[in-house]
Image: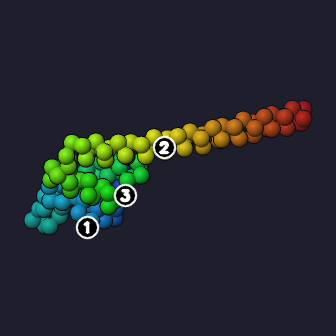
Amino acid sequence: MLIGELAEAVGLPISTIRFYERRGLLDDAHMDRHGNNYRVYNAHAVERLTLIKQMQRAGITLNEIHAHIANYEADAYTAAQKCQFFSQKLALVLAQIDAMREVEGYLREKLAQAQAEAEQHAQAQV
């Protein structure tokens, strides 16, 4: 698939994909070059970009993602290091979930208050 198709498939702008290429997050294993020098991306590119998006949503920086991918692909992590990395990131995600639940509770409370206010206002109009 060409870059526009890849961008659509993963929900990223073309400029972001090019940026990831420059950062070394996408390499020749994720694409072939044709005679016209167009890059034709493969399924591995979709998987890699999806992984990057998920890791970023979890609060992992691009530098951490790059280092993690490089070490993982080079089989440079011990099993203990993999466990430590994923445990730390899981703890981060769980903390974010807790924070979002607090926000959810606040918003639900404010919504209930606003609905009660609207109901009182509607009844006063009758």
| Mark 3 Cα-neighbour bin, 10 Å: few <14, some 14–19, many ≥20 | few
How many numbered discs?
3
Residue 88's x, y, as percent?
37, 46
Residue 108's x, y, as percent?
66, 37
Q: Nearer the viewer, residue 85 or 19?
A: 85
Residue under numbered circle 1: 22
* For discs 2 and 3, the disc positioned in front in the rendered view: 2
Residue under numbered circle 3: 61
Residue 4's x, y, as percent?
29, 57
- Counting residues from the start of the chain, the first of labels 1 and 2 encountered is 1
* For discs 1 and 3, the disc positioned in front in the rendered view: 3
- Counting residues from the start of the chain, the first of labels 2 and 3 encountered is 3
Residue 94 visible here: yes
Q: Which mark is residue 95?
A: 2
- Tell me whether circle 2 and circle 3 mark residues in contact (CB < 8 Å): no
Where does the C terminus fall, quadrant-wise? Answer: top right
Disc 1 to disc 3, how far (Cα)?
Answer: 16 Å
The amino acid on which the numbered mark 1 sits, given as a three-letter code, is: Arg
Is disc 2 placed on a helix, strand or loop? helix
The amino acid on which the numbered mark 3 sits, given as a three-letter code, is: Thr
Q: Residue at x 17, y 52 (%)?
A: 76
* For discs 1 and 2, the disc positioned in front in the rendered view: 2
The amino acid on which the numbered mark 2 sits, given as a three-letter code, is: Ala
Q: Nearer the viewer, residue 126 or 66?
A: 66
Residue 8 visible here: no
Residue 44's x, y, as percent?
20, 48
In the rendered image, the residue lying farthest to the front is: 80
